[in-house]
Image (cartoon, coloured by chain):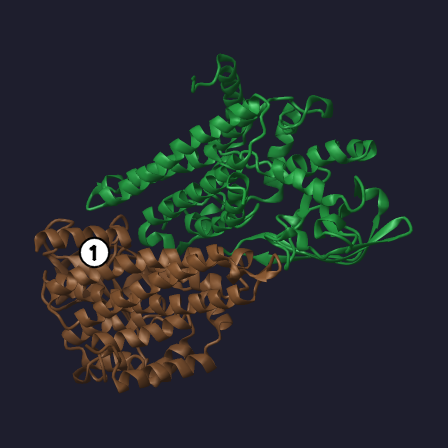
Chain colours: A brown, B green
Amino acid sequence: MDFTHTETRRMLADTIDRYLRDKYPLAARVEAGNSEQGFQPAQYEALAELGVIAALFPEDQGGFGGEGFDISVAFEEMGKKLVNEPVMENALIPGPILAAAGMDEAVENIIAGGARYALAAEEPQALYDLSHVETTAEKSGDGYSLSGKKTVVRAANGCDGYIVSARTSGGTNDTDGISLFLVAPDQVSARDYTTVDGGRASELTLEGAEGTLLGDEGGAWPALQAASDRAILALGSEALGIMQTIAAMTIEYLRTRKQFGVVIGKFQALQHRTAEMLIEIEQTRSAVINAANAMALGAEERARIMAATKYTIGKAGRRVAEESIQLHGGIGMTWEYDLGHFAKRLIMIDHEWGDQDFHLSRFVALGRAA
Amino acid sequence: MDLNFTQEELAFRDEVRAWMAEALPKELATKVRNEAPLSKDDMLQWQLILNDKGWLTYTWPTEFGGTGWGPVKQFIFEEEMAYACAPRILPFGLRMLGPVLMKFGSKEQQDYYLPRMCDGTHWWCQGYSEPGAGSDLASLKTAAVREGDHYIVNGQKTWTTLGQHADMIFCLVRTSNEGKRQEGISFLLIDMKTPGIEVRPIQTIDGGHEVNEVWFTDVKVPVENLVGEQDKGWTYAKYLLTHERTNIAGVGKSNQMLDRLKDLAATQKRNGKPLAEDPFFAARVAKVEIELMNMEVTNNRVLSQAEAGGAPGAESSMLKILGTEIAQEIDDLTRRALGSSALALTPEVDEPGYNGDFVTPEGFGHASESYFNHRKTTIYGGSNEIQKNIITKMIVGL
C-alpha cells in the first residue's frame, strides 16, 4: 500500500496552491460570484494556462493526466481557496463527451481555456434523476429538432455550446432512448440567475432548437453516468479542500477567541466537537481516495463507490459546515468573514449531482442488484 | 392527568383564530409564509393592528394596559399567530424592556416609554453584546461616565437586531470597574438620534441585513435615562433574559413549517413519485415530527406548571435547545426537498404582480437563505452550549 501522490501530482498541487495563494483573493471571487458573469474569465484562462484543465485530460486528448487522482488533486487545491471558476462545469464534464464524439478541436480549445461548453441534463421535477428526460429530439433534415426544459445548468452563460440530453425513444424515466446533442446557444432561450453559493446558473428552454447528435442515438446513458462519476469525484475533492480550510479557520479561532477569561478552545465541550469534525474530514478524505481510485474500474463496480462517496460528502459536509459556524458563534454568520462563504459552498455541493439521500438509496439499490 | 386545553381555553383559541383570519393582511401572511424579508412598515402595520385590538400587550399585566392573560392564553395566542403566519411581534420593547421598566423603572419612565413602545413612536433595539462580550456578557466594556447630569458613553455594541430602524436603544454599560464584573454594570436608555451614535450594518451569510454594530463616541445621555440604580444593571438584565426565554420552543412556528414542508414533499416528484414516498426522506421528516410532538408535550408541561404559579427551571434551557434544533432540522429538510433548485436566487418572484416561471417551487424561493440565516438561532439568546451549562449547573449542581 502507498497513499502518497506521485511526484507529478504533488507538483501539480504545489503549482495550483502557489498560484491561488498569490493571485486569487477571496473578496474578488465573492464579488464575481454575485455578479452577472458569475466568475472571473481572466482567472479561468489563467488556470488553463497553468495546466489545470490539461491535467484533467489524458495525453491522447491533448492533456497530461485525466486519471482519477489527477482530477482529485486539482479540485482539492481549488476547493481550499473556494475557486468557483467553472472548470468542472465547462471542461471536466463536457470535454470527454466531445472527445468521444471525435470533436478534437473543441477539446483542444477547452484545454486551452478558449472555449467553454455546458452539459444540460437535469430537468425540472427530476430531483437529480438524469434518466428523467421529457425533452424530445426529432429528426429534422440533417440534424435534430429539440424541445423541452433544462434546470439549474451551472455556468451556462457565455458558453460556446450546450450538450443537451433529449429523448429519442422510450418513456420518461427509461435509461434507454436518451441521446446527447450539441446545441448552439442562439438556439436556446436562457434565464440566468445568481446561485446561493456565488455563481451563475440558467434555466434553458428549447423550442425546436437545432441539435447535432453526439454519440449513438438512444445510447447516451453510460456517458451521463460517466459524467456523473467525474462530477462526484470533482465535487468530493472540492469539498475535501473546503473542509480543510474550514477546519484550519475553526482551530485558529478556538486558539485565539477568549470568553470567560480563557481561549474557548480550552472548553472540553468544544474540543470534542472539533475532534468529531476532524474525524468527519478524515472519513471524507478516504471516500474521495476511494472515488479517485474507482475511476480506473469498470462502470458497474465504480457506481456503488461513487454513490458512497457522494453520500459521505453530503453527510460530512453538512456536519462540518454547521459545526464550524456554531463553533465560531456570531462572527461565523457574517458575510464579511470568510467562513460563511466556504460553508455555503459546502452545503450547496449536496445540491449538485444528487444529494446524500439520492445516493444513499442508489447505494442500497446497487447493492441489492449485485 | 388531562392533556387537553379547557373548554374556556378552546373557546379563546377559536376567538383568536377567527379574529386573526379577518385582521391579518393577506400580503403580510404570504411574505411570512414564504420567508421573504419584511420591511419596517410591514412589521409596524401588524403591531398597530394588534395595538388597536388591545392584544399587542398580551404578556403585560392589566395595570399597565395589558390583557392580564395567564401563560396558557399567552401561549395559545402565540401559537395562533404562528399558524396564521403573522409577522413576529418584536420583543425588544414589549417583551424585554417593558417588563424591566414595570419592575425597576420610575413612574415617569413607565408613563413615558410604555405607551410609546406600543403605538409605534419608539422602535427599540437591544444593546447587550459586544465584540469581546458574547456568551460572556459580563465582560462588556462600553463605558458610561457620570458628568454632572449626564452620562458620557463610549464603546461599541454588536449584533443589534434591526437597529437600523430603531429610535431608542436600551444598553448595558459599565459604570464601575470595582468588585465583581457583574456589579459595575448599569442599564441605560439612549435616544438613537443623539450625536456620536453610528449604526453600521452587518451583512449576514444569507445576504440579508438584520443586525448591526452600534458605535458610541462621547454620547451624552441624561441621568434620568438610567433605569433603577447605578451599578445594578446586571440584575435587571437577568430579569429581562428570563422574559426573553419564554415560548422559546416555538412549537407553533415549527408546526407551521413542518406542514409547509409536507406540502412541498407531496408535490416534489422523482420518477413520477412524490418525494414524500421516498423512504429516506419520509423517515427524516417522520423523525423530526416525532421530536416535535414530544417537545409540544414538554412545553405544555412547563406551561401548566407556570399557569399554577411555578417558575420554570432548567426546562427553559432544554426547550431553547430542542426548539432551535428542531426548527433547524425542518429548515434543512425544506432546503433539501428543493433539489437543485435550492441553488437559485430569484428575488424577482417576490415583486408584486410577478407572473413568470418559478425556478424553485412557488413560495420556496427563500428556503436556502432561511436555512443559513437560521443558523443564528443556536447561537443567539444564550448559545445552546451556554444553555447546556445552565442545565448541568441547575441539575448536576457541580
Q: Could you tell me which residue is drawn at 59 percent across and 29 percent down?
A: B311
Tell me the chain of label 1: A
Residue lying farthest to the top in this orientation: B7
Task: Report which residue position mark 1 lands on.
Answer: A130
Of the pair A148 and A282, the residue shown nearer to us: A282
Q: Is residue A248 above or below residue B113?
A: below
Q: Could you tell me which residue is drawn at 14 percent across and 77 percent down?
A: A102
Q: Give the quadrant of the C terminus of chain A.
A: bottom left
Of the pair B135 and B180, the residue shown nearer to us: B180
Q: Is residue A255 above or below residue A259?
A: below
Q: Give the left or right position of residue B23, taking residue A209 as reference.
A: right
Label 1 neighbourhood size at 10 Å, few (<14), some (14-19), many (20+)?
many
Position of residue A45 measured from the top left corner of the image (x, y, whole percent): 37, 80
Position of residue B2 measured from the top left corner of the image (x, y, whole percent): 43, 17
Q: Is residue A215 above or below residue A70?
A: above
Q: Give the left or right position of residue A282, taking residue B65 as reference.
A: left
* Residue A195 visible in the snapshot: no
Locate residue B48: give its quadrant.
top right
Q: Give the left or right position of residue A265, taking residue A168 as reference.
A: right
Position of residue B186 measured from the top left corner of the image (x, y, whole percent): 76, 47
* Residue B45 visible in the snapshot: yes
Residue lying farthest to the front in this orientation: B398
How many numbered badges does the structure rendering display?
A: 1
Position of residue B295 measured from the top left corner of the image (x, y, whole percent): 43, 33
Helix, strand or loop for disc 1: loop
Residue type at numbered disc 1: Leu
Q: Is residue B314 above or below residue B201?
A: above
Residue lying farthest to the right in this orientation: B148
Locate residue A275: give its quadrant.
bottom left
Q: Give the quadrant of the N terminus of chain A.
A: bottom left
Of the pair B215 and B199, the residue shown nearer to us: B215
